[in-house]
Image (cartoon, helix red, strand yellow):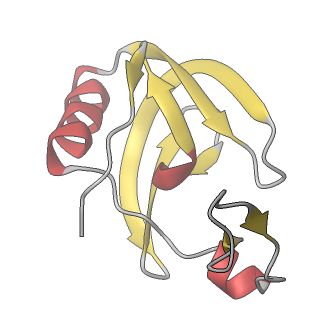
Amino acid sequence: MKLNPDSTQHTIVDTGCSDASANLYQAVSCSFYDELEALATLHRICTIRYRTETGEAASIESKIIDLYTANKSEFLKLQDGTEIRLDRLISVDGKPVSFTNY
């Protein structure tokens, strides 16, 4: 999707993005990552809202047991084995995810 440059109304035009460009990772902010690390260290159950690979909103209550990097993306792993790419997060314990600006 991109803005139509020929329009003063800035309508959205579908550019037929490939799956590769749609899957580019957007890093979360350092401060948000630090909060995730703290939750993992405290072994605290938290409410995690995120988007699935199909874009649907989902929610789960679990402990974060690991944070790791794979294929140039960051992930969290929950106690039940669920793995969530960090840029799919919506909020953790009610705090909205924040991203880096670069």
Residue found at the very far front of the displayed protein? 8
Q: Residue at x 36, y 51 (%)?
A: 67
Q: Residue at x 84, y 83 (%)?
A: 16
Q: Residue at x 15, y 40 (%)?
A: 31
Tell me where residue 64 appears, x and y as whole percent: 43, 33
Say above or below: 34 vs 12.
above
Tell me where residue 26 appears, x and y as whole percent: 42, 64
- Give left or right: position of 94 versus 37: right
Q: What count of labels does the image hold?
A: 0
Q: Nearer the viewer, residue 78 or 47?
A: 47
- Give left or right: position of 36 versus 30: right
On-image quarter of the C terminus: bottom left
- Give left or right: position of 51 versus 42: right
Tell me where residue 34 appears, x and y as whole percent: 17, 40
Say above or below: 25 vs 15.
above
Q: Nearer the viewer, residue 81 or 61?
A: 61
Q: Nearer the viewer, residue 85 or 57?
A: 57
On-image quarter of the N terminus: bottom right
Q: Nearer the viewer, residue 34 or 99?
A: 99
